[in-house]
Image (cartoon, grey):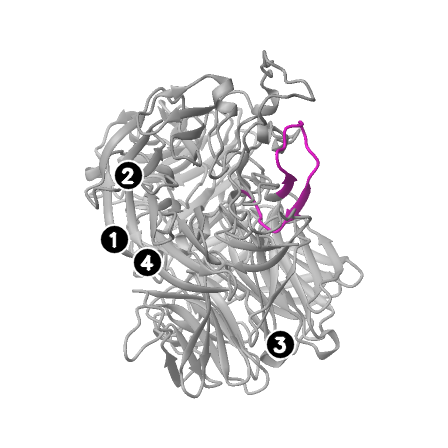
Amino acid sequence: GRCCAFSPDGKFLAVGLNDGSFHVVNADTLEDIVSFHHRKENISDIKFSPDAGKYLAVASHDNFVDIYNVLSSKRVGICKGASSYITHVDWDVRGKLLQVNSGAKEHLFFEAPRGKRQTIRSTEIEKIDWATWTCVLGPTCEGIWPTHSDTTDVNAACLTKDKKLIVTGDDFGFMKLFSYPVKGRYAKFKKYVGHSAHVTNVQWAQDDSLLLTVGGADTALMIWSWETDGNRDNKPVDSEESDDTDEDGGYDSDVAKEKSIDYTTKIYAVSIREMSGTKPHLQPKEVSTEERPPVSRAPPQPEKLQKNNLNKKKKLVEEIALEHVFGYRGFDCRNNLHYLNDGTDIVFHTAAAGIVQNLSSGLQSFYVEHTDDILCLTVNQHPKYKNIVATGQIGTTPSIHVWDVITKQTLSILRCSHNKGVSYVNFSATGKLLLSVGVDPEHTITVWRWQEGVRVTSKCAHSERIFVVEFRPDSDTQFVSVGIKHIKFWTLAGGALLSKKGTIGTVNDARMQTMLSVAFGANNLTFTGAISGDVYVWKDHILIRVVAKAHTGPVFTMYTTLRDGLIVTGGKERPTKEGGAVKLWDQEMKRCRPFQLETGQLVDCVRSVCRGKGKILVGTKDGEIIEVGEKNAASNCLIDAHMEGEIWGLATHPSKDHLISASDDGTIRIWDLADKKLLNKVNLGYGAKCAAYSPDGEMVAIGMKNGEFIILLVNSLKVWGKKRDRSAAINDTSFSPNSMYLAVGSAENTVDFYDLTQGPTLNRTGYCKDIPSFVIQMDFSADSKHIQVSTGAYKRQIHEVPSGKQLTDPALIEKITWASWTSILGDEVLGIWPRNADKADVNCACVSHAGLNLVSGDDFGLVKLFDFPCTEKYAKHKRYFGHSAHVTNVRFSYDDKYVISAGGDDCSIFVWRCL
């Protein structure tokens, strides 16, 4: 049997079979009254007409609906015109009209009993009074279809007699209840789970008091009754609110960005610049006509590079060692900043480096065994595993490293099945188990016995991003996961993971929202921070109350200790007198104390909080790490790094251990390399691409992404002059050694010279013609008469200053002594190009002031140290790791004591000491 229907008086029962036949039987005795076999395919729906059941409509998979006169037992009409199998039929109240759905998503109408096809406008359909409504198509039930659904996903529907509610059964095992009519797409619903797989049919009882549903594979008939208000409050219901497409709890740009972030583009080494042409190590070498004999009486060739420190002995740099990193990854991570050793140290990460910083001395030490961006970090809280940290990275086969903070030794490497990356890790109460969740499409949750490197179990957890998985602080078997419209309470039972969805129940107007953070309380309480700024309080897996507007924006992070049970929350908030982006709450989250962060930002967005002795450690989306005193509420900024955006501009001061950096985040920052601190910063309101100090160190020229360049006075960071003659990004700026000219190189294949002697008017006195591609680096000659320009076509050209005329005579070019060398092109630096440079590029280079060394940065995240000149192909070098992807710029400090490198996507500046 495939379908059945009672006659209006209940005396007859019609049954459609799979072989194309149907029977009408006596409803009491089940004796056969009449049977027909007009069709070959199965009979999919069958219905008596409402008026005394005179006619019977029989729908088949042969694409036809046959109409029979029950009294004379004759076929009186055939409804033709459907282009696919028929799925549902309904009569109107008069028994004169049939509505039909087909597998081709058609909604058709036929006049009864002859079966003539009718065309009815959608506005008219609503006015027709239907005896039943079991169709799944039509303007009044458009909203029952879920997002990304197929035509066959919703199998059945049934409307109540009062036409207020419609119920559907679908291929996902859900029974959903909608308010009727269901106009517009993706309507709100209540969802009930009982069947294991496909729900094949749903039907209300004659008085709508009961609902009957049947399952396909589970062969079960289920009977559902209404909940009366009396017994509604005391027991949780296995229902869920609908997954809206619009965010419940509102929209937030940071959450939306994090939800859609794609780490695959970051995993592979690709060129960060779109260069074109033949790479230097593959270009044919031009043979010089005048080869010098090894011994010659001719005057010696002038130096390649001006030696700035002739009074000192020229020193060769043998090694460089990482000494400090300015950076903290807050923009897409959370809970990745922790106290260690009773609050004397902190641990965090940026780029591919795990960083331990001593709070009193400011000294840093590093764990650099990861091969790509670290996305998450957690500290083992069990005393037996003191100072043990786990970090997870991105990658096609990403890994989790468990390491010792003191020795920086790797204790375990866990190779994951989370393709793309590991977004969160957390240790269990005994410290023996580790939880991880991936950014893979299945968002798999995995439990590890990390010491043995063994995976205990893993499970696909949710179709959308999961932000946090945390063990209860006193448990090795229970943990909670939260994410996009998701909260689940998990139990590890042997090798199996069992989960319960959070049940909203009847707490006033509460809805399932996107949850971003978790904290735990005594007596099995769980607190989750929502996108709306509310905090939901759960007892076991049932919602018991809501802390409304704990923050005005999303609650990105929460932290609690078993010590006193107080809870810290961090959210997105505009700083006001009453509110702050960090709040300390009592154990029940009934009272709180807000803290001001004093960052000067319009909106503070906190991504990580942690509590130590009387202090709260805060990490923000904008790369700041701040320590707040609980008693005096004073805030102390430990790290104030660049915000999200690539850093391309780097320049070192001509006579001090100072550095200036320029980033896509629109800020210029001046750093003290000796004291390892930020001296000053200014927001220019637009992405900055490059920076250069004037020869006396009093001014700095900044090139902007919009084609403007700005000259600032270093002491005050006030604007001295600015000009915009180009509309594409300025990629490099350079002052001439005699301080007369500023050269400005752009992505429009231009180099312009500006006269500095006339003051802030900045008159353009000349420009270079015939530059084949965008400018990447420029260097002046020591006498300020020439400039070398490297371009995106792997071509280096020499021009006269300020006329811009190109110099092509190799003999003359050979004699030029350069004031600086930052070019990646030229015979002198041919050896920096590696064999595997076909996939990715060398982005930057810098020759030391002693003229003996060269450092380069490339798209593989490597900083390399060479001897200069470096004319042999594939020259010998030493390589240093720490940046995750592209190294965009490198510089030596004025006295060659430091090398500084900037990262592209990792928003970090690395300071290396020269040894």
Tag in front: 3 or 4: 4
Tag in front: 1 or 3: 1
Q: Earlier in the sequence, mark 1 or mark 2?
A: 2
Is residue 490 visible from the viewing direction of this image? no
Point out which mark residue 95 bears.
Answer: 2
Q: Earlier in the sequence, mark 4 or mark 1?
A: 4
Q: Split into 4 quadrants, where in the image is the N terminus?
A: top right
Q: CA distance from mark 4 to mark 2?
A: 78 Å
Q: To which residue does mark 3 refer?
A: 473
What amino acid is at disc 4? Answer: Val
Q: Earlier in the sequence, mark 3 or mark 4?
A: 3
Q: To which residue does mark 4 refer?
A: 682
What is the magenta range? 864-886
What residue lies at 37% left-to-right and 54% top-to-bottom? 668
Mark 4 Cα within 10 Å, few/some/many (few <14, many 20+)? few
Q: Are marks 1 and 3 in contact (CB under 8 Å)?
A: no
Q: CA distance from mark 4 to mark 1?
A: 11 Å
Pick the front one: 208 or 450: 450
